[in-house]
Amino acid sequence: MKQAISHRLERGGNAHLRAFTIVELLVASAVLVIILGVIFSITQQTSAAWKSASSKIETFQRARAAFEAITQTLGEATLFNYYDYEYDSNQNPKRYYRKSDLHFISGKSLVSAQLTQAVFFQTPAGYSSSQSYQNLESLLNACGFFVTYSIDDSRPDFLASLPSQPKARYRFRLMEFLQPSQNLAVYASSSGTGWFTSAIASPAPPVRQIADNVIALVIIPRTSQGGELTTDYEYDSRSWTPTSGGTQPATSNQLPPLVEVVMVAIDESSAARWCTGSSAPALVAGSLFGNPSSLQIDLDTLAGSLAEKHITYRIFRTTVALRNAKWSS
């Protein structure tokens, strides 16, 4: 009998020793909460990193596609130059000189609100907004590319009437100018830039955004050997006429054989931090890109400035051969 009671007490005592105390349960719960918190934090960080990486990839993919569109279209630029007589005061032929009814121009301050540089030219894109001409694939179009800083033009008008309207979204934008063939205005005058400036300033300009967050576009006309055709990035095939006097410069009524194109884009998160108002943030110093011979130095300076501001960026750079150029010096 005593042995049975002792055995039961021993079993009961062992059972009591194997149970968890309240302190142990609280400690285990605290450890579990900490582990769950760490897992949740890691999940959040991973999700944020994924979203940020996806946003950067998407932004730079759009920029890459726009850059390829620029280089492809620019490679098809044409001028159709020919030779004609220059006459003296008695209407006697004096000399030959190159002529063209078309125009190739690149440089700064070509259109209103332009940032960095722009380029405008003609190309046989075959684009027409009239059904009567849409099957003619070699129709000539006026084309151009430039960077501006503006509000989103696709923003619905009704948002302005809402009591708590969303904040206006200002961004750097890469714009494409594409004038339909039936509206081609380059033949209206043999000089000047009205063929694209008037169209862009019209109530319904033939302009569309092809990429956002592009902060710089740089155009460098070059010789077939890669030399610089301009000392200040300014190239104008119409800059000389017979009345100007002197020898006709090589750039007059000619396409540059090569054009180097440089484009700088930033990611959306960086743009959201800096593009907070109606005035463009000074991400590209006005002192940059003044002389083509300093192009690499200027790009290094810009890269360092963007890195100091913790801005993620990409630089796209290539040289395009203009296949329709018939260069003659």
Image (cartoon, rainbow, N blue to C red):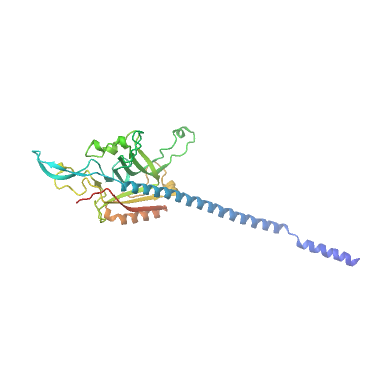
Q: Residue furthest left?
A: 90
The percent coordinates of residue 85 (x first, y second) are 14, 42
The percent coordinates of residue 267 (x first, y second) are 43, 49
Residue at image position (16%, 45%) is 97
Q: Residue furthest right?
A: 1
Task: Determine whether, in the image, residue 127 is placed left or right of residue 165.
Answer: left
Viewer-proximal residue, 227 or 286? 227
The percent coordinates of residue 157 (x first, y second) are 44, 33
Q: Quadrant of residue 8?
A: bottom right
Residue at image position (58%, 53%) is 40
Q: Is residue 24 above or below residue 113?
A: below
Residue at image position (37%, 50%) is 264
Q: Residue furthest front?
A: 135
Viewer-proximal residue, 11 or 157? 157
The percent coordinates of residue 93 (x first, y second) are 11, 42
Task: Determine whether, in the image, residue 3 is placed left or right of residue 39.
Answer: right
Viewer-proximal residue, 56 or 41? 56
State the count of labels: 0
Residue 273 appearing in the image:
yes
Task: Determine whether, in the image, residue 18 is placed left or right of residue 176.
Answer: right
Viewer-proximal residue, 142 or 212? 142
Q: Quadrant of the N terminus?
A: bottom right
Residue 288 appearing in the image:
no
Q: Quadrant of residue 293?
A: bottom left
